[in-house]
Amino acid sequence: MTVQSAGNPPAAVRDSKTPAESQVMLKHIMSEHDTNLYGTIHGGVVMKLIDDTAAASAGRHADGPAVTVSVNRMTFLAPVRAGDLLSAEATLERAGRTSMDVAVRVTAERWNFSGPVTEVATARLTFVAIDAEGRPRSVPALV
């Protein structure tokens, strides 16, 4: 199936995609500016990395903008410290007509990069794809 609009060449429209096609990983080194009174990284800083990673995955699947509708689950498993390299990996788990559920796993490599990688948080979020006017729009099926 192809779609053609006035003045633009035809663009292929995908009916379905695999989870691998929308998988995204973002990495960020935590700094002392992100710490709380306990000397660990604010949970909100980790939540922003999770939301950014999940949004990129949803947008990749939807071939366009997608907005966060809900954070269905957020679990903090271990503290994060300044100097840790955080890796957030997002994978699409479900695609509805306009919505998508995204799972995110966050790991930390300690500042000295010795020792095991530690899982520090997990989350599940729901996104809705939107058009230029901010209205929900259809997304490809997930296979």
Image (tube, grey):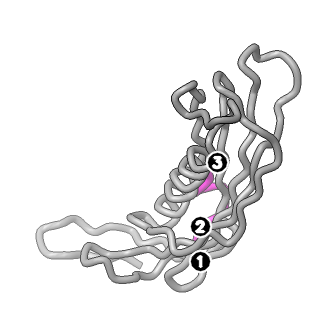
Tell which residue pokes out farthest to the left in this image. Answer: 7
Residue for point 61% across, 76% down = 95
Question: Could you say where residue 96 lies in the image, as x and y percent from the top left?
Answer: 59, 83
The percent coordinates of residue 47 (x first, y second) are 60, 52
**Residue at 58% from the left image edge and 40% from the top image edge:** 26
Sequence-earlier tag: 2 or 1? 2
In x, y percent, where is residue 32?
A: 57, 25
Which residue occupies the foreground of this view, 35 or 3?
35
Q: Name the residue under label 2.
A: 17
Disc 3 residue crowd, few under 14, some 14–19, many 20+, Cα 10 Å? some
Q: Which circle marks residue 141 in the picture?
A: 1
CB within 8 Å, label 2 to label 1 = yes
Q: Which residue lies furthest to the bottom in this view?
A: 97
Query: Most extreme residue toward the front, as rendered?
Result: 37
Is residue 39 within the magenta segment?
no
Q: What stretch is highlighted in magenta?
A: 16-23
136 lies left or right of 93: left
Task: Tell me which amino acid carries mark 3.
Answer: Gly
Q: Distance of mark 2 from mark 1, alpha carbons? A: 6 Å
Question: Which circle's residue, 3 or 1, is located before the other in the chain?
Answer: 3
Q: What element carries label 1?
A: strand
Upstream in sequence: badge 3 or badge 2: 2
